[in-house]
């Protein structure tokens, strides 16, 4: 067995665990008889655990630092302040955690080799403990605007872009390649795909993270991506049950209410989750939302037994792992205190408690609930069995460590990067093309001014969108000038952009969530007034086009990551034809009851 920067590997405690679960991952693929035998072995493991160890297995926590034992001083300070420990190893020893979640902002994901070494350090920290068990390491790697692991890993278009491509094969390929790369870095659970059906253009938290607004189309892509992850040996996670697509409130900051009737939920929100379950999804994440038609108690779905047990477990027949959305979000904290939330979540049917804001409070609350009889050890053991069963299926009992060689052979290799580029080319959507302005020609429009919004860059970008797009167009033979004008350009910024058009033959402007009052509208209108040809690219929501109906050529990339911007540049230059089709309708700005462009709209080039 090889490891990436880990020193010695197997400890005696790990050999004991392996002896008790030999061949677990292979057996789980055989059938119900084999699964029963595996469950018996896992139950024997559980029977030897202390109550404190059982409680710990239910928690998945953040931790700061690039190393499990030697993080930077700033990360040590953050760990001491928030978690009461110095390092990941100390955190695991104190709480006997079942999992760790990686975040870029927690400095867990600097580069692939560092991630692999961190994963190995986390596994060793757990396995070297008495009765040590392998850790389930997770992250949010949705691709598009949500990616915790950046370059040089392969970054794919986000969900709405995949919805615009409409290819189950592409969704499956994404899951398979993304899963392989995560697995090579020691990450075995990915909180994706998003199974929410985005029917509300004002949705501030889902939007382009959804495959689209058609339940059947979303269901097909959720199932395909799930199958890809399944093939890679990484657990996919359908989220956010029972459906977060129709809200104007972000559950990170408020408590959304979904007003769908039970019948509407069945036809609109449920199909993608049914498809995920049928495809063998390993885990499902809950939503911190209120759905009165499913539970009129006023509790968020994360804490609702009628929703998680009555509907998800009993009606939909799901027996995999249920993980909460992050417990530090406002949507789950407004009605109950941080000591009650984890207990109520377990009573509702949850298996994994994700990122409690105060781990000490949450962990002790669950422990006390068992000691006081509010929760039984048997209830905890149901969830622990599901979690251990998943760890076994993913091969963590057989091989918890990863190698530097595996990283080199897998992460960001040419074949994976080329696949991402090909997929992206099939997603760029041409919404408007008056007078066949596109594609731009180096002969007629050799000098391009690239301006527009430069929102905070997600992982997977090499710089501001204007710079990335300008560089991509320059590689295609144009002479380009990049000018960032921001998401709320001032009058002076607009004037500067207008002045810069003097030396350009055409303008490419990136728009970002344009509203009726946005000064981005002023920018585009004044650029149009110069008489220079203007091409607009919606770099997030495709709804921007409704606010700017006079733009002669408008495209949608659904995100501003490098892979999508490079693909958009190739479309603009005519190197590839636009093939994407809107996966959501775009309503008229002056009459939202009417569609400006329906689902399925998308133009191509005549020649």
Image: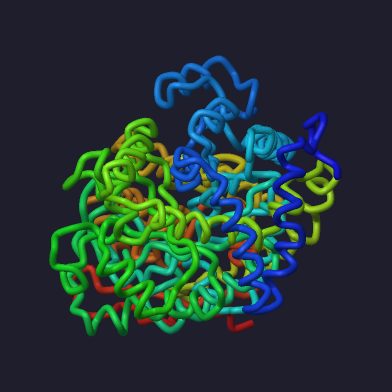
At 36% across and 39% down in the image, what residue appears? 367
Q: Is residue 22 left or right of residue 555?
A: right
In this rendering, the answer to whether 476 lies above or below 309 is: above
In this rendering, the answer to whether 121 lies above or below 529 is: above
Q: Is residue 531 left or right of residue 232?
A: left
What's the colour scheme?
Answer: rainbow
At 75% across and 60% down in the image, what residue appears? 416
Q: As rendered, which of 595 and 502 lies closer to the eye? A: 595
Q: Position of residue 53 (x, y in %)?
A: 50, 40
In the rendered image, which quarter contains the C terminus? bottom right
Quadrant in the picture for residue 203: bottom left
Q: As rendered, which of 395 and 66 lies closer to the eye? A: 395
In the rendered image, which quarter contains the N terminus? top right
Q: As rendered, which of 524 and 378 lies closer to the eye? A: 378
At 32% across and 41% down in the image, what residue appears? 371
At 25% across and 62% down in the image, what residue appears? 304
Quadrant in the picture for residue 11: top right
Q: As rendered, which of 577 and 505 lies closer to the eye? A: 577
Using the rendered image of the protein, determine whether residue 392 is visible from the camera's viewpoint: yes
Using the rendered image of the protein, determine whether residue 508 is visible from the camera's viewpoint: no
Q: Report how many numbered discs are placed on residues in the image.
A: 0
Q: Position of residue 467 (x, y in %)?
A: 57, 43
Q: Is residue 127 left or right of residue 261?
A: right
Q: Position of residue 574 (x, y in %)?
A: 65, 69
Q: Position of residue 481 (x, y in %)?
A: 57, 43
């Amino acid at each position: 067995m090889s490891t990436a920067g880990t020193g010695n590997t197997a400890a005696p405690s790990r050999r004991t665990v392996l002896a008790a679960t030999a061949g677990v991952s292979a057996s789980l693929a055989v059938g119900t008889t084999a699964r029963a035998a595996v469950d018996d072995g896992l139950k024997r493991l559980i029977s030897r655990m202390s109550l404190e160890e059982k409680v710990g297995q239910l928690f998945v926590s953040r931790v700061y630092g690039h190393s499990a034992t030697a993080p930077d001083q700033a990360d040590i300070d953050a760990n001491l302040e928030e978690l009461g420990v110095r390092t990941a190893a100390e955190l695991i020893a104190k709480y006997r955690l079942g999992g760790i979640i990686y975040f870029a902002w927690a400095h867990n994901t600097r580069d692939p080799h560092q991630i692999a070494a961190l994963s190995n350090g986390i596994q060793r920290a757990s396995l070297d403990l008495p009765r040590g068990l392998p850790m389930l390491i997770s992250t949010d790697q949705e691709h598009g605007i949500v990616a915790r692991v950046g370059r040089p890993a392969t970054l794919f278009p986000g969900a709405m872009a995949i919805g615009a491509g409409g290819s189950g094969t592409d969704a499956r390929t994404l899951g398979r390649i993304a899963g392989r790369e995560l697995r090579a870095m020691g990450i075995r659970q990915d909180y994706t795909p998003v199974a929410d059906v985005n029917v509300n253009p004002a949705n501030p938290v889902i939007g382009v993270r959804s495959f689209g607004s058609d339940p059947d189309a979303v269901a097909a892509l959720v199932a395909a991506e799930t199958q890809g992850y399944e093939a890679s040996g990484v657990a996919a996670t359908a989220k956010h049950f029972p459906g977060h697509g129709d809200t104007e409130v972000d559950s990170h900051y408020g408590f959304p209410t979904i007003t769908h009737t039970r019948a509407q939920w069945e036809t609109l929100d449920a199909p993608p989750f049914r498809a995920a379950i049928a495809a063998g999804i390993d885990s499902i994440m809950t939503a911190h939302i209120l759905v009165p038609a499913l539970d009129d108690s006023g509790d968020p779905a994360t804490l609702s037994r009628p929703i998680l047990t009555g509907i998800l477990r009993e009606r939909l027949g799901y027996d995999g792992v249920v993980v909460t959305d992050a417990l530090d979000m406002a949507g789950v904290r407004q009605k109950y205190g941080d000591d009650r939330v984890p207990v109520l979540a377990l009573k509702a049917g949850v298996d994994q408690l994700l990122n409690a804001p105060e781990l000490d409070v949450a962990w002790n609350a669950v422990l006390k609930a068992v000691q006081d009889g509010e929760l039984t050890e048997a209830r905890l053991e149901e969830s622990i069995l599901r979690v251990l069963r998943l760890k076994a299926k993913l091969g963590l009992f057989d091989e918890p460590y990863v190698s530097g060689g595996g990283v080199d052979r897998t992460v960001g290799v040419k074949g994976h990067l080329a696949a991402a580029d090909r997929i992206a080319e099939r997603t760029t959507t041409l919404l408007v093309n008056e007078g066949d302005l596109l594609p731009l020609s180096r002969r007629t429009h050799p000098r391009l001014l690239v301006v527009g919004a430069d929102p905070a860059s997600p992982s997977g970008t090499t710089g501001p969108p204007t710079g990335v797009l300008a560089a991509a167009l320059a590689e295609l033979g144009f002479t380009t000038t990049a000018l960032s004008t921001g998401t709320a350009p001032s009058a002076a910024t607009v004037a500067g952009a207008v002045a810069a058009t003097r030396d350009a033959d055409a303008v490419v402007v990136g728009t970002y969530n344009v509203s009726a009052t946005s000064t981005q509208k002023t920018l585009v209108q004044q650029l149009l007034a110069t008489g220079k040809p203007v091409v607009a690219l919606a770099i997030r929501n495709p709804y921007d086009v409704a606010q700017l109906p006079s733009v002669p050529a408008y495209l949608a990339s659904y995100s501003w990551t490098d892979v999508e911007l490079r693909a958009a540049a190739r479309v603009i230059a005519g190197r590839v034809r636009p093939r994407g089709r809107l996966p959501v309708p775009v309503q008229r700005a002056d009459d939202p009851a009417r569609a400006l462009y329906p689902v399925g709209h998308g133009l191509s080039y005549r020649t």
